Amino acid sequence: MNPARERGRRRLVAVVTFIYLLLIFEGTLRKWVFPQYGQMLFFIRDPFVLIAYGIAFRHGFFPRNNAFLWIGIGFGLIAVLLVGAQTFNSNASGTLLLAAYGWRNYFYYIPLAFVIGESFQRQDLERIVRWTLILAIPTAALVFLQFMSPLNSPINVGSGDESLQFRGLAINGDHTRPMGFFTSDVGQKEFTVSAFAMALSLWLSAKAHRYMKFWLLLPCTCAVLSCLAVSGSRGAMLACGIVMIASMACALVIRGGGVSTRAVIWPSIIGIAAVGLYPILFPAGFEAFMGRWNTALADETRYFSLGIFGRALYGFIDFFSLMGDAPLAGWGLGLAGNARITLGIQIEGFTGWAETDWARHIVRSRAGRGRHVHRLPDRVRQLAGLEQSARRAPAARSVADTALRVPTGSICCTGRFPVTGRSTAIRGCSPASASPPRRRARRMRSLRSRRIRR
């Protein structure tokens, strides 16, 4: 890589890292720092994403021959036509803004994952992981205070006027689902699960490959588990369990370097310690979570044969019931979300509410349904990245990469940016971590040439 292109790559990495930090702290700006500008700050990342695209295109980090990228861009172009049709056929004011908002959530960030995969190197990924785990420490303190505070306290809903406050879901009548630095408990849930996967990946790595010291990794892991303890989220608990099981199963496939031993010992230690200390260190959180679990389980058993698992699988089939009722072009991009309520837009003929992510795709537009077609082969691309990582990296590092990517399997582009943004970052990190380290490859070639000359 020539010096000019390397400088461009570093600028691109810096911009993307800034976008990642904005994804975490944008809620802080909207809730407590500038609550009066909360709606405008929602779009604060967009110009920086555009800058990242410009740098990537100028320095050749925009993948031009990637079929998955162009499929996504194709759906985005089709959606532009639907935005025009949606605006033209509606008499409601604000329809254009709602459609543009929906298009932005669905399609604007698609190329960013591919740009990350082209430009990021291993040291850049390690920096992201390190910063995320360090940020888990203040996050843990914040979510504990939010959990213990009244539902309508400023630390939960923000410091703005009542119309500008962010009221999340409650675990029970006394405790909220903490939102952390985000404006939604969904964002905090995804932060906790992905941070748990990052921490576990380091515990599974050999000491020589662990780029965080033990004295720092231990409190960071405890902070992540503390966030999980007061989250009140069954989805977060199950997702972390899936991360642990997948990491242990990976060790059975990838052998060598003591991976199998570490993949059994460390998840077992973490799991046993977390379960044993949960009711002791966080009695209120444990009581609230178990109450939520039992109440929800009773309701789900009434409607689903498999209980919580039937409730989870429901999201993959309930959209079929909407396909016959939704118009050919959908009811409109951005419709099945909070933006429609905020803007006060009423769509004639629309009476339903899409609860699950796939159902939102059906309600919003046919182009949104195309996301089903786009993201399923994209999962295959991620699995191919795992196989490349196993071939190109040491076994321990491959398990670490796998643990980092597991949350991606349950994260999809939903139109909710706390999920979409983190999904974009992790999906971009997957091919980047599978790529061979460029600097190390150059050093190896140099050493080989010296040996030949001798």
Image (cartoon, grey):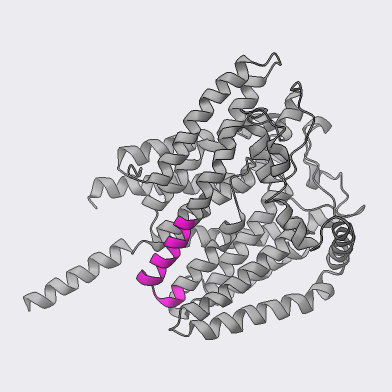
> Where does residue 194 sit, x and y in percent of width and height?
60, 60
| Quadrant position of residue 37 | top right
Q: Is residue 384 magenta?
A: yes
- Please count the marks in the image: 0
Residue at far right of view: 173
Residue at far front of view: 324
> Where does residue 360 sit, x and y in percent of width and height?
68, 39
> 139 or 232, which is in the foreground?
232
> Where does residue 117 sit, x and y in percent of width and height?
41, 52
Q: Main secondary structure of the magenta part?
A: helix
| Quadrant position of residue 288 | bottom right
Evaluate whether residue 444 shows in this view.
yes
User: Residue at coordinates 76% horizontally, 20% vertically from top-left?
Assistant: 348
User: Residue at coordinates 30% horizontally, 42% vertically from top-left?
Assistant: 59
Q: Is residue 297 left or right of residue 247?
A: right
> 229 or 434, which is in the foreground?
434
Segment tinted magenta in the rendering: 380-397
> Where does residue 95 sit, x and y in percent of width and height?
66, 20
Q: Is residue 191 magenta?
A: no
